[in-house]
Amino acid sequence: MQRTRIVAVLATTMGLALAVSACGSNTTPSASTSAAGPASAGGTLSILMGTATEHWDPQRVYVGVNIEAGNRMFSRTLTTFGPVAKDGDAATLVADAATDTGTVSADGKEWKFTIKDGIKWEDGKAVTCEDFKYGVSRTFAVDVITGGPNYAIQFLDIPKNKDGSSAYAGPYKKTGQDLFDKAVTCSGTTITFKMAKPTGDFNSATTMTAFGAFRADKDQGDKSNYAIFSDGPYKLEGTWTANKGGTFVRNENWDPKTDTIRKALPDKITWDESLTQETEYERLIAGQGEDANAITFDQAPVTALANVESGAPGRNTIVASPYTRYLTLNYKSKVMSNIKAREALALATDRSAYVAAAGGDTVVKATNSLINPGLPAFPNTPLLAGEKGDPAKAKEALTASGLTMPVKINVTYRKNDTNDKVFSGLKTGWDAAGFETNLIGIPADQYYGTLQSPDSATKYDVSWAGWGADYPSASTVIPQLLDSRSQISAGGPGQDYGYYDNADFNAAIDKTMAITDATAREKAWGELDTQVVTKDFAIVPLINDQFVFVRGANVEGAVVNNTFTGYYDLANVSVKH
Amino acid sequence: MAETGVVEPREAVDARDGAVEIVGRTPWQITRSRLARDKGTLIALGAAIFFIVLALIAPVLTFFHVIDPYSSHINLLGGLGSLPTGPMGGVSAEHWMGVEPGTGRDILSRVIAGLTVSLVVATLAVLVSVVIGVIIGIVSGTAGGRVDWFFSRVIDFVLSFPQTLMLIALSTIVIDLLQSAMGTDRTPASMVFMILVMGFFGWPYFARIIRGQVLSLKEREFIEAAKSLGASPRRIYFKELLPHLWAPILVYTTLIMPQNIATEAALGFLGVGIQAPTPSFGSILNDSVHYATSDPAYFIFPGVTLFLVVLSFNLLGDGLRDALDPKADRQ
């Protein structure tokens, strides 16, 4: 937060109670107890986006932007990571809709939360324990409720079928409903979850909106995708138009006394996702008119970076993002099933080209770990051959592989201008080592769908991917990307895009999940990361990006919350007006 | 079109008895003399030839490292956003048009290499259009009746399709199909895709013109004479009609070329088309537009080059049309 504005914001915080309790009316505090500063309740916050929202359905949201915005605007969860005072501060796990961060039994297999009194839906009805139970059950309807995280399926004590799917098929089909009702029980306002295995950090998983409440009578299945029904400070006005956006207005039934997280200062929040990242940053940097009240969750495109510091001094933020970009090597392809070929590719990878193409080392840092540096599990694996790679050593490895040179490989990546430059640079390095690289750029809206389809096994040898930890534990990184049992199926590789399938590795994952001591557990995750990168060469980590954000001059309280999604936290945002 | 009856004296020859002898000239000689007087068109012709030659020898130049569109020069970049550190976008003795932000690749080399892709695609597309259009135009014009009506409706149908939208919509699927059918990298498949689609949408333009010409020539005496002498349709098409059609074909070819170049650039601009790292005008301009405020030279150099290429073909086409027949219908 800007030093010059802290005083002003603190001064009006005292007037906030008045303004906020008059929810719905536009009155600004008439009698503040101290000098009224510029920041106060009211005004319209404008959110500009260049990426379309795929899902607002809480059980289907799996993108950081929508988790953050959804949770802070309309979908409260049992626990959450609280807002922070300044960029880069670590957030603490706090209670949101629950009275505390939950109680766990001694064996780590049973979690209890008590729902706060007074939390209401936008139609005035109370949010009940049954609403939370129903919300969690929707994740099991895997054919309808698609796209969301499947931690509920992974953690809850519900048996699995022979093919790996859960014996509970969700609240629409109701097959195995009794099994679910035994695993998640409601007693008054207390909800109890039974875990399949000891799960020490379940109350971190409950920060995701997938564990948010859902009203059974409002459930339209797939059609609920954009039909937001709120229990938070804002509700959707009218309907949401895909690729265009919508407007959020105050939820009169939200009681600020039940909510220690959200200040809900703006009266209205408009969300416009019809733009491109380039145009929205031009507007934000110029900051004319309404754009002075705007923020974005998109980070600055490479082309705008040069203008960020000169054009928006004092209202830009450069912070570490929770994301790692990496390459997966396809174990099912003829070339990459050969370990020497994989080693050669890893040795010849020129990360300095990536850094340059993505905007320089202020915004991008080379890495050789899948886990990002913000997590305690970060093993800081040293680069195999320096930042530029070593084509000569790689050529030796490739010759040792026995494959006929030049070795043809198909490399896919998500197509945009920056990645075109990145992969042109990477291609030069690989071709110098004896590969013959064929680059295939796939448009963004089809990219992950293509990687996750079953015929990706035969079409591509190397694929680019990005991943951020869902919450600050590497248990949201290693198993999500490399556990073949939960990822690979007849429907495709899931997130294990390289079809990495190692029984010993899977056993090591189970052992690590069961470790109760957090430090020892994170260290074990780090060791698995190093193994998969330096011994198996299944993954070639490339870079960690920094996020670069620009905000409008009238926007205050916009602080990046690194622990909770890594974007601007809407909880304390206000607009000068 | 070119009226064979116009005769211009080339020179006066003193005959023995003082009378001036008038020597007739062929249509081509007339055209050449008109062209020779039109300095603007000659310059455009020179420029067009220069660009074509450059495009043709670019792969050779790359092979012998005279130009280098692929090597990065990260040491020439700096700062937040990896912009070129030299003046005017990194202009220097080695890099006459500067270097590309993010990679440091030489822009002049990339523009020349992009010229190859753009001109190859545009030329082959025009050839496809010409071949299909001329055949259908001749057949439609000479056959008349139901055949003519049918082809005219086909022409209307194809002309009403939005070409660019079709290109974008079909691109991923068709290029994948072509790639597996051709068994090559993505770039040749993309080029074949664009040639086929642009050729397909370009032929009605030619067919209409040729059909119009054929309809007016059909009733002429020399056609009737050939028919009455028992000439086969094929002889009529190729020996009687075609020589009169070269002129419009040539003119409209040079006018469609810049359109095709611009379409290819637009496709690259929209993200469809040639796969990186092969440069094309479209992909270069697409990238450079975003650097408009931070590195304008990156847009100006390739933009001006594209403008000059398109302009030279346009002027050449106009000039040829004027030279071949100044009284020709402006369409």
Image: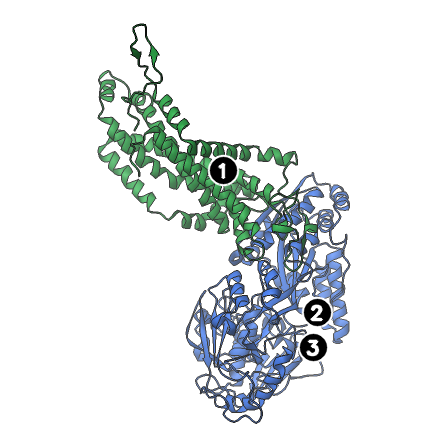
Chain for disc number 2? A
Residue to which mark 3 is pinned: A200
**Residue A553 vertical placement versus B323 (above, below):** below
Residue to which mark 1 is pinned: B119
Which chain does the green colour mark? B
Residue to which mark 2 is pinned: A374
Between A312 and A275, the one nearer to me in the picture: A312
Label 2, secondary structure: give it.
loop
Quarter of the image holding residue B80?
bottom right
Label 1, secondary structure: give it.
helix
Residue kind at label 1, given as amino acid type: Leu
Between A264 and A407, the one nearer to me in the picture: A264
Which chain does the blue colour mark? A
Q: Does the rendering let one see residue B129?
A: no
Chain for disc number 1? B
Quarter of the picture holding the N terminus of chain B:
top left
Q: Does the rendering let one see residue B217?
A: yes
**Residue A368 vertical placement versus A36 (above, below):** above
User: How far is the residue under mark 3 from the one under mark 2?
Assistant: 20 Å
Between A280 and B133, the one nearer to me in the picture: A280
Give percent across and percent down for residue B72.
66, 47
**Residue A256 vertical placement versus A327 (above, below):** below
Q: In the image, are marks 2 and 1 on the same chain?
A: no
Give percent across and percent down for residue A256.
53, 88
Residue kind at label 2, given as amino acid type: Gly
Give percent across and percent down for residue A297.
56, 69
Residue kind at label 3, given as amino acid type: Gly
Quarter of the picture holding the C terminus of chain B:
top left
Could you tell me which residue is drawn at 56 percent across and 79 percent down?
A: A573
Q: Residues within 10 Å of mark 3 (few under 14, many from 20)?
A: many
